[in-house]
Image (spheres, rainbow, N blue to C red):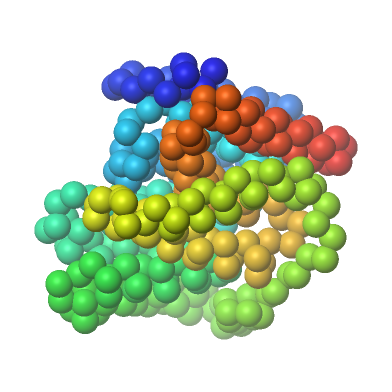
């Protein structure tokens, strides 16, 4: 199976995976008509579908089928069917921001920071717990932009445009109350019972091994590979902060890590020294995700 997925993907691959994704979204919503939320399902589908194009934008996996397949399995295992509208919007905005921030054209990146700021504001309005993404973008600007202060100004200007529009509508409709959830660290939901997360322990261990292996051979990597991998890791840390602080029992938050985890794991599998290790690692990931899905499904009922 690993050898089959290691083949180079072509222009028809992404539409096929998007078609499979569409079937997954439709199937999960048809199973329970009481929780059918068409708008949330459409936004979720759009956000996850855009994620497939982010693989080519990040370009860390040599355009193989492996990361696309792992991403699809991650979505299948973690998508509950009745996804919260805030998480759905966040998946969409994150995918758009990744496409903008990883664009090879420098002028496109420099001219997109106002749009990125607007997306961050929309993201924050729908899901305040995603505030670490703002820190990630600021770090990215400081580390990559030629005129960092100018780009940060554009970022905050885009953020301010959405904020002023939001407050104007709120004032017009006489909505003068303030939700405490919009203050960072106000809605912490620490979870002492790991519950179903035990079944994802093998995936977590492989992720830790993949990151450690990357830094073990860091000096052998090309400058481009180092930069892109660092970008992916900082993005993952931003998502991980949100998950650790606010996930609680809302396991859908793990969807934020589906894209970076697929890239990191597939890259780790590609560089394992023995074929049987690659095949074993691949099936261990698939088995863990499927078992997690089964237990979460039966736990729901």
Q: Residue 98's spot in the image, x, y percent? A: 35, 52
Image vertical order of residue 53 relative to residue 246, above or below: above
Residue 30 seen: yes
Pick whichever, 297 or 227, lies toward us: 227
Residue drawn at x 31%, y 51% is 220
Give the quadrant of the N terminus: top right
Image vertical order of residue 8 relative to residue 32, above or below: above
Residue 125 seen: no
Give the quadrant of the C terminus: top right
Q: Quadrant of residue 35?
A: top right
Pick whichever, 111 or 281, lies toward us: 281
Q: Residue 193's spot in the image, x, y percent? A: 84, 60
Q: In which quarter of the image is residue 51?
A: top left
Residue drawn at x 48%, y 51% is 213
Q: Residue 115's spot in the image, x, y percent? A: 28, 62
Answer with left or right where residue 133 lies relative to residue 277.
Answer: left
Q: Residue 32's spot in the image, x, y percent? A: 75, 32
């Amino acid at each position: 199976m690993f050898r089959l997925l290691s083949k180079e993907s072509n222009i028809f691959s992404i539409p096929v995976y998007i078609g499979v994704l569409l079937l997954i979204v439709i199937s999960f919503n048809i199973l329970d008509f009481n929780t059918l939320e068409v708008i949330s399902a459409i936004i979720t589908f759009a956000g996850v579908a855009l994620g497939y194009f982010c693989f080519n934008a990040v370009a860390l996996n040599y355009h193989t089928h492996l990361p696309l397949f792992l991403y699809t399995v991650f979505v299948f295992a973690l998508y509950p069917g009745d996804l919260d509208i805030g998480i759905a919007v966040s998946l969409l905005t994150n995918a758009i921001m990744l496409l903008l921030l990883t664009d090879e054209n420098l002028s496109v990146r420099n001219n997109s920071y106002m749009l990125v700021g607007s997306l961050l504001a929309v993201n924050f309005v729908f899901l305040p717990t995603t505030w670490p993404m703002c820190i990630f973008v600021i770090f990215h600007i400081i580390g990559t932009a030629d005129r960092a202060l100018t780009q940060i100004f554009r970022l905050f200007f885009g953020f301010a445009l959405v904020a002023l529009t939001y407050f104007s509508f709120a004032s017009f409709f006489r909505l003068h109350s303030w939700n405490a959830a919009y203050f960072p660290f106000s809605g912490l939901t620490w979870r002492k019972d790991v519950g179903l997360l035990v079944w994802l322990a093998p995936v977590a261990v492989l992720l830790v091994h993949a990151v450690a292996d990357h830094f073990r051979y860091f000096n052998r990597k090309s400058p481009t590979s180092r930069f892109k991998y660092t970008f992916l890791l900082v993005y993952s840390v931003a998502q991980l902060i949100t998950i650790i602080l606010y996930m609680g029992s809302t396991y859908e938050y793990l969807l934020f890590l589906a894209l970076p985890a697929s890239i990191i794991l597939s890259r780790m599998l590609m560089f394992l020294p023995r074929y049987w290790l690659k095949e074993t690692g691949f099936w261990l990931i698939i088995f863990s995700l499927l078992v997690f899905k089964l237990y979460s499904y039966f736990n729901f009922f």
